[in-house]
Image (spheres, rainbow, N blue to C red):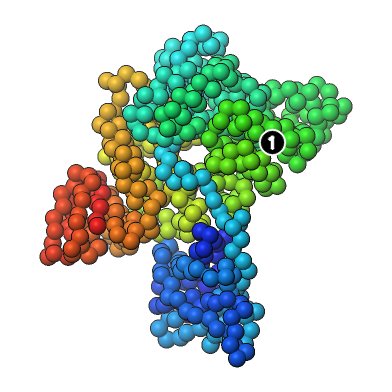
Amino acid sequence: MLKEAIYHRPKDNYAYVCTTDELHIQIRTKKDDLKKVALLHGDPYDWDNKQWKPTTKPMKKSGSDQLFDYWFAAVTPPFKRLRYGFILDDGSETACYTEKGFYPEPPVDDTAYYFAFPFMNHVDIFQAPKWVKNAVWYQIFPERFANGNKENDPENVIPWGSKEPSPVNFFGGDLEGVIQKVPYLKELGISGIYFTPIFKAYSNHKYDTIDYLEIDPQFGTKETLKKLIEVCHKNSIKVMLDAVFNHSGFYFPQFQDVLENGDNSRFKSWFHVHEFPLVTETQQNYDTFAFTPFMPKLNTENPEVKEYLLGVGRYWVKEFDIDGWRLDVANEVDHAFWREFRKEVKAIKPDLYILGEVWHDAMPWLRGDQFDAVMNYPFMTNILNLFSKESISVKEFVEYMTSVIHMYPKNVNEVAFNLVGSHDTARILTLCDEDIERVKQVFTVLLTFIGSPCIYYGDEIGMTGVMDPGCRKCMIWEKENQNRDLFIHVQKLIRLRRDYPLLANDGEFSFVSPGSDDCCLAYLKSDSSKTAVVILNTSNKVVDYTVPVDVSGKTVVNLWDAKVMEVSGRKLEVSLSAKGFAILLLY
């Protein structure tokens, strides 16, 4: 038993309240080291004859990555408090693992040896808006989606799609264009729009804000936005705006005041100024986003800055009834600000979705006091490595994704913002070398996995593009130039996700453990009566795959066009075409 690899702490993804009554416990051990793990648990005040009276519950191995096994158990403490440890068995040795270390036998003379979950306070439960679990998002880069009103076109606008996108050209996309295309979005089946910034800014991407309280004139007016949100809500589509609170734009009036007045500016403490003058021939003397001089970093610890930005957060929720805030560069803003931000906006609209842009392990932001979710870039990385780069095996994909899943509690994973492309990445079809079958597989995983999936505008019709600015082409609206087969594929997956909640976030998720040479990725989503099975063949040859579920006495519903054959009454074999897939429902 390799005790050095065993890890647990009574917090975050290792111990958390999932519902009002249910407590989830997880422990990590060396891969393939232990045969069994049991949770030893009890009320800290339950004693008999000067001995503590714990009970044991077998733990389930919930997954394995390259280095570790993860074991899971759910318990319902009757008095909402718990002391607990773990009984570890490697087949030749047993040990009791507690907060104070390892013991040959469980100590029962004192509960102080054990891990403590003092009380299951309701306010500490991570609770994202319930509607997010079933949402399918669609990301729109407003300048490139549709031009619905040529009267608000910016100067030097060029005809729609007439040139390749660049950092400085404008094509005239606006909010009226989105309103006109709501029927298209409804046809596709999405239920939420995530807009990149729409506030007044200098650039075409609008991440360099000039005025946080005004719509950029090239996009329309506040009345246009109100009309857009009203139309979306009538069509059961949520609207999420993008807030850039880490930095302002170079032409933000307060920053211009500092540039002009230097040390005498009343706004100098709004930014992270090193020294004056702010700008010399060789350098800028202020902190920025990613060394970008036209994006000066805001000092969110400054009370005036904090109140200004909190006012922005409140304003668009209260006055326009938006449904979510996506927070740009969220990991570079202090935690205290985000805690206050959450309280302020949730006080106005409790089911508002707060999404942070964090590219790495985001557990510090996902404890229920800051964000409801983060953009799931680790998910995207693994998807791209398997299906586009083809740089990892199915076995490695399962191991990497198992690690990602076990980074967070179950109720966090259910609302994770899953994506396979955005305005910051090359388009998925380009990354897949324009292989439509691989792209179809990517969308199949995206729309049947745990979490809240997002489609980048145009990916559903086979648009191409390299990294920014190539990924920001004008949306193609001529049907003859769209890949309608891919559109129908995505549309059907969205419909299945809606019609069969098990394909969204109902039930328990588990991978089918592949062998080192297996070319099929398979996972199950199960509740007490049904099991959904998703299988993808990543190879270039036909594969007959045996579903690892006892199907005797079960009804098998083929939700996709795969060839299904029953074998010996208990097993199910599926014939998968090259780069094909199957989606089955068993009940």
Q: State the residue in front, 342 or 295.
A: 342
- Residue 301 position, x and y percent, is 75, 41
Please tell me which residue is depicted at 27% across the width and 39% down the height of the picture: 437
Residue 49 visible from this viewpoint? yes
**Can you name the residue that lies furthest to the right here?**
264
Locate residue 422, reporting x and y percent: 46, 35
Please tell me how many numbered marks the rendered image carries.
Answer: 1
Quadrant of the snapshot with the C terminus: bottom left
Q: Quadrant of residue 438?
A: top left
Mark 1 Cα shell of 10 Å, populated few (<14), some (14-19), many (≥20): many
The residue lying furthest to the top in this view is: 151
| Residue farthest to the front, as pictured | 78
Give the percent coordinates (x, y) of residue 439: 32, 39
Q: Circle 1 — which element?
A: helix
For the point 45% across and 18% down, the residue is: 177
Placement of 333 over or under 284, stated as above or below: below
Is residue 289 among the parts visible in the rendering? no
Question: What's the residue at 37%, 24% (across, down)?
Answer: 183
> Pointer 1: what residue?
310
The residue sitting at 40% across, 50% down in the picture is 505
Position of residue 195 in the picture relative to residue 398 (left or right): right
Relative to 580, does residue 125 appear above or below in the rendering?
below
Of 29 and 17, the residue lying toward us: 17
Point out residue 61 in the picture as x, y percentages from the top left corner: 41, 69
Residue type (three-letter) at the residue carrying disc 1: Leu
Image quadrant assignment for residue 204? top right
